[in-house]
Amino acid sequence: MMQKPPSLFDRDREWRALDAFVTDQRPLATLGVVSGRRRQGKTYLLNALTEAVGGCYFGATEGSAGESLRLLGEALGDWSGAGAPLRLDNWSAAVERLFSLGGDRPRTVVLDEFPYLARVEPSLPSLLQRELDAPAQARHGSRVRLLLCGSAMSVMGRLLAGTAPLRGRAGLELVLRPLHYRDAARFWGVSDPGLAVLLHSVVGGTPAYRREFVRDDAPRDRADFDDWVIRTVLEPATPLFREPRYLLAEEPDIREPALYHSVLAAVATGNATYGGIANFVGRRTPEIAHPLAVLEDSGLLAREPEAFRAGRHQYRITEPLVTFYHAIMRLQWTRLELGLGGQVWRESAQRFAAQVVGPHFEHLCRVFATTVGPELFGDTPAEVTSGVVGDPGRREQIQVDVVVFGQPEPGAARRVLALGEAKWGATIEVRHLDRLRRARELLASRGYDTRDTRLACFGGAGFDQDLVAAAGADPGVLLVPLDRLYAD
Ligand SMILES: Nc1ncnc2c1ncn2[C@@H]1O[C@H](COP(=O)(O)OP(=O)(O)OP(=O)(O)O)[C@@H](O)[C@H]1O
Ligand SMILES: [Mg+2]
């Protein structure tokens, strides 16, 4: 296998997949597609790849068809050592040229920011298809390994969907995702789990936010966190400050940004159901269907099922920075631009706890529960989500932060492996455990299989003494301390 360069953090699985793709020796041209949200490291990864394999990297820019052709000609000329730019008169010629790159070994060509090219030349996918199809292949005997890359998820998704010309033709479909929260902590060089959660609730697992966007400034320790927030994300001179606005501005399918900002604000402030969002935004529900679909396609929103109400969903913002922006920055934008980040941050403690890190910690606990082995919950989790259990007798709703379901068995009652409470800012007490017990009883009476349901307390701030005693007396109660989330 090709050596992964040491500067490339993590991404081992992706590197293996790309390696297999570009070193495939078969005598035919092949196509791969690499996609992923902005700033996840697609360009960085593909640059490292072309360097390792001696391939050609072309990063398209927004420009006219003529200019793009000229730039591509220059890149190919440079790479092939022709000494002069290749003359490409039109896209048909360009594609033919690409596929005629001869030789007896595979040649890697990366077209990064492919959506720009597809916009100026909408027939590009069909032209590629023609060359990838058998007769053309036979003509050239090319072993080109063509990688198309882009972050406009809508465009990249459409490339391979439905009746699109390239459907069924890609031998590699790689989606570059944010780093897992545990890897993100390592990437930031943070070993204190408490600091890691705080940090992840602001910048998530997006690698770029560790580098160029803050000039490598990481918080030294937990005591430095407040100051770090003030000197980075709340500081108008760092690129991170404007990033959450750019993220939306760069989505090609968004025509009415104000509406999209309001939709995201709704979700960020806890109005995360379909009806809740419509209500917050002040539109009728059919009017928000389109923006929700676009945000989902672009990977900024994810839809998660409610555990105990079939067909009901909650939306979640997938990029923590966007949540942070809507909860803390958006309504204070003018003051922040004036450099009053310190003041704004001191006033925001409550909101940061309630709207940002609290819900984010619950999410991290669900991620943890999704990937934990069978030892914790007695069986391998099949689905992890959150839910609400109505208690008609006491006229209340019990919010359950972490609901772990086991493998579904046809015809059998749904097995609940665990019900969990996650708390970031306050110790968990016996009354929280009692609520989980009550939820378990109610679910049993509603036909769920709760025979082996464990009750899990995820304590960001630890556990009260009585709770520790109660857990000691009942093997069905699990106390999961913060460190456990970060232990491999
Ligand atoms: N695996 C990694 N190891 C180390 N640094 C990384 C890694 N991935 C990304 N980075 C850092 O993040 C920066 C941004 O990544 P890059 O520009 O490749 O993202 P991208 O997905 O191409 O974004 P865009 O969609 O905006 O073009 C890189 O310049 C690099 O500093
Ligand atoms: Mg890029």
Image (cartoon, rainbow, N blue to C red):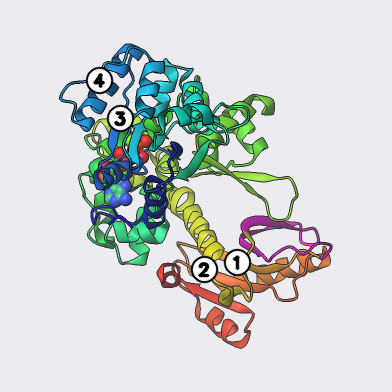
The residue depicted at 74 percent of the width and 51 percent of the height is 309
The residue depicted at 72 percent of the width and 69 percent of the height is 440
Percent across and percent down for residue 12 are 37, 57
Range covered by the magenta-colored residues? 384-412
- Residue 159 visible, this angle: yes
**Among the two numbered marks 3 and 4 on one chain, the one whose residue lies closer to the N terminus:** 3
Is disc 1 in contact with disc 3, using a CB cutoff of under 8 Å?
Answer: no
Classify mark 4: residues with Cα within 10 Å, few (<14), some (14-19) or many (20+).
Answer: many
Is disc 1 in contact with disc 2, using a CB cutoff of under 8 Å?
Answer: yes
From the image, which quarter does the N terminus lie in? bottom left
Q: CA distance from mark 3 to mark 2?
A: 45 Å
The kind of residue on which mark 4 rests is Leu
Magenta stretch: helix, strand or loop mostly: strand
* 409 drawn magenta: yes
The kind of residue on which mark 1 rests is Gly
**Among the two numbered marks 3 and 2 on one chain, the one whose residue lies closer to the N terminus:** 3
Nearer the observer, disc 1 or disc 3? 3
Q: Which residue is mark 4?
A: 86
Q: CA distance from mark 1 to mark 2?
A: 7 Å
Q: Nearer the viewer, residue 122 or 371?
A: 122
Classify mark 2: residues with Cα within 10 Å, few (<14), some (14-19) or many (20+).
Answer: many
Classify mark 3: residues with Cα within 10 Å, few (<14), some (14-19) or many (20+).
Answer: some
Q: Which residue is mark 2?
A: 458
Q: Which residue is mark 1?
A: 420
**Among the two numbered marks 4 and 2 on one chain, the one whose residue lies closer to the N terminus:** 4
228 sits left or right of 116 in the view? left
Q: CA distance from mark 4 to mark 2?
A: 61 Å
Percent across and percent down for residue 315 are 58, 43
